[in-house]
Image (cartoon, coloured by chain):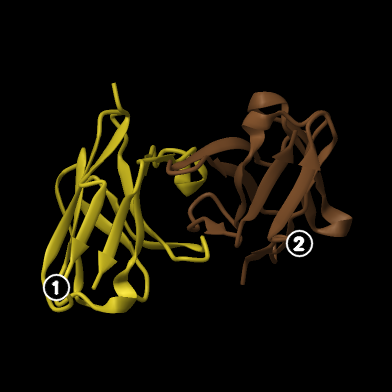
Amino acid sequence: DTAVSQTPKYLVTQMGNDKSIKCEQNLGHDTMYWYKQDSKKFLKIMFSYNNKELIINETVPNRFSPKSPDKAHLNLHINSLELGDSAVYFCASSQLAGGFTDTQYFGPGTRLTVL
Amino acid sequence: AQSVTQLGSHVSVSEGALVLLRCNYSSSVPPYLFWYVQYPNQGLQLLLKYTSAATLVKGINGFEAEFKKSETSFHLTKPSAHMSDAAEYFCAVSETSYDKVIFGPGTSLSVIP
């Protein structure tokens, strides 16, 4: 069983389009994250939710909107896609009981290419 | 503010040789420190973490790291490299358990047969 899954694995789209990436975890964790990894492999946190509540919101354009329908799911919707949004997006989850320093479990990533 | 630097964006070692990946951190308090590994086309996986217990931390796959406060370092080592160790390695820091984890820029490890 996959612990943290993301769909789709690859996403190729035109500038200006709106797209969503879905993430699900079956680990029973309270906390989920979205990270962006750029072409130089630099990994930066974007958002974090705990039990459907937003707890980290980094300096991210408001074109990016996370949605957590329940604590096992955290989806990322991106409006008006730009070339600079091309990256690999990783979802992760952890327990919050130990804070953010509890082990984070990462999904396989979604490679977004904006043309 | 907390930050992480990793000396050497790319390291090559021969199979069977010592692996040494360097990580230095900046933190105003004793931090939590992590090493994560990313195999090609996969997500990150925790190798080991330091949480103010023993300064020498043993992780999975034969890796270990030593926390040296005087040097603000947390270098990752493995006595003998395997081909399967070829991957991207990320050092990360968090000042408290409720601060977000900050990742370093990563070091790509190549293992030469």
The residue shown at (55%, 37%) is B46
Badge 1 amino acid: Asn
Subunit of label 2: B
Residue at which label 2 appears: B7
Q: Residues within 10 Å of mark 1 (few under 14, many from 20)?
A: some
Q: Nearer the viewer, residue A48 or B8?
A: B8
Q: CA distance from mark 1 to mark 2?
A: 37 Å
Residue B113 picture location, percent across and down? 75, 33
In the rendered structure, are the residues bearing label 1 and label 2 in contact, judged by CB atoms less than 8 Å apart? Answer: no
Q: Is residue B76 left or right of residue B95?
A: right
Q: Is residue B41 above or below residue A27?
A: below
Which hue is chain A drawn in?
Answer: yellow
Q: Is residue A87 left or right of residue B26?
A: left
Badge 2 amino acid: Leu
Question: Which chain shows up in brown?
Answer: B
Q: Quadrant of the C terminus of chain A?
A: bottom left
Tell me whether marks 1 and 2 sit on the same chain: no
Residue B67 picture location, percent across and down? 79, 45
Residue B11 picture location, percent across and down? 74, 52
Q: Nearer the viewer, residue A78 or A53?
A: A78
Residue at which label 1 appears: A79
